[in-house]
Amino acid sequence: MPRMSATAPLALPPPPPVQSDWALFLDVDGCLLDFADAPEAVVVPEGLADALARLSRALGGALAFVSGRRIVQLDALFAPLRFPSAGLHGLELREAADLAHVPDAAPEALRQARDAAERIAAGYPGARVEDKGIAIALHWRAAPAARASLEATAAAALAQLPGYRLQYGNCVVELRPAHADKGQAVQRLMGATPFAGRLPVYAGDDLTDEDAFAATNALGGVSVRIGHREPTYATHTLADTAALRAWLSEAAARLGARA
Ligand SMILES: O=P(O)(O)OC[C@H]1O[C@H](O[C@H]2O[C@H](CO)[C@@H](O)[C@H](O)[C@H]2O)[C@H](O)[C@@H](O)[C@@H]1O
C-alpha cells in the first residue's frame, strides 16, 4: 500500500479523461454534491443525473456510488435512477440495481446515544442528529458550537457499543459498525459483474474515502481526491465538486456519443 503523505502536500496531477474500460466509483457528499447545512438539504444539480445515466451506459453499467448515506437515501436523491451502490461506508452493498444487503437493526445502546445526542442538539439550533438505523451521524455544520458536546457524547457511547467505531467526517462524527469500510466495498464490487476486469477509478473527498483510495491503488487503479484535504492516499486530484462534475460531463458527452 502506498504511504500517505504526512509532511509537505503532494502536488497531485489531475486524472486523465474517463475511459470506456473503467469501473467508476463515486462518493456523494462533498464530491458529486455540494455540502448543505443538513443531510436532506442537498441539491442534485440540473443535468447531473442525466450525465451519470449516460456515463453508466457507456461504461456497461460499471458506475457505482460509495457513500456514508444509506442506499435508500441515494435512490431517493437520484430517483428514478438506481445505480449499483455501497451505503453506510460499505456496510450496505448493492452490486446491481435489484439487489441489496440490508444490515441488522440498531442495538439499544445506539438508540440511547441517539436520544442523548438529540437532547444536546436541541440546545444548539442547526445541530442535527441523523438516524441511519445501525449508524447515527451527529452534525454541527450549521452549529459549530455543538461540536465538542456531540463529539464527547459519541466517544462516551462508543464504550457501550462493542463492534462499533467513530467515523469522523466533514462537520460530523458518526457511530457505525466497524466491520466494513469503503475499501472493502470497492474490492467486493470489483469482484462482481459488470465491474470485474475493468480498471477501478475512485473519486472522493473525505476521511472515509481514504480506505477506498488505498484499495483502488492496490488494484492498480486511479484514486482522485476532491478538494485539498491532506494527507491522502489519492494519486490524483480535482479542485472541487464543480471540477468533478465537469470531468464526468465531458466523459458522458464523449463516451455517450460512441455508445
Ligand atoms: O460518503 P459520503 O457520500 O460523502 O457521505 C458522508 C456523509 O455525508 C452526509 O453528511 C455530509 O453532507 C451533509 C449534506 O451536505 C452535510 O450537512 C454534513 O455536514 C456532511 O458531513 C450524510 O448526512 C452522512 O450520513 C454521510 O455519512
Image (cartoon, rainbow, N blue to C red):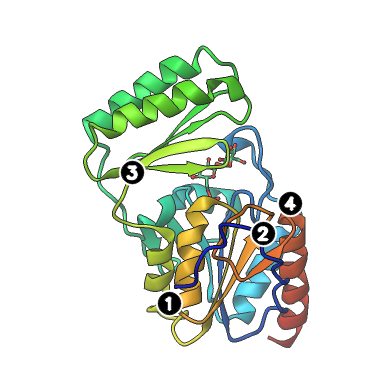
Q: Which mark is residue 45?
A: 4
Identify residue type, mark 3.
Arg
Image spot of residue 160 (x, y percent): 23, 31
Q: Which mark is residue 9?
A: 2
Disc 3 within 8 angstroms of ligand 1 (CB): no
Q: Which mark is residue 190?
A: 1
Q: Looking at the image, tell me whether mark 1 or mark 3 is earlier in sequence order.
A: 3
**Contact? badges 4 and 3 (CB < 8 Å):** no
Residue drawn at x 23%, y 35% is 107
Foreground: disc 4 or disc 1: 1
Identify residue type, mark 1.
Met
Q: Looking at the image, tell me whether mark 3 or mark 2 is earlier in sequence order.
A: 2
Residue under numbered circle 3: 165
Report whether residue 218 is seen. yes
Foreground: disc 2 or disc 4: 2
Looking at the image, which residue sits at the far top?
Answer: 123
Foreground: disc 1 or disc 2: 2
Q: CA distance from mark 4 to mark 1?
A: 28 Å
Tell me if 47 is positioned left or right of 182 in this view.
right
Q: CA distance from mark 4 to mark 3?
A: 33 Å
Instruction: Say which quarter of the image contains residue 87.
Output: bottom left
Mark 4: secondary structure = loop
Mark 3: secondary structure = strand
Identify residue type, mark 4.
Pro
Q: Looking at the image, tell me whether mark 2 or mark 4 is earlier in sequence order.
A: 2
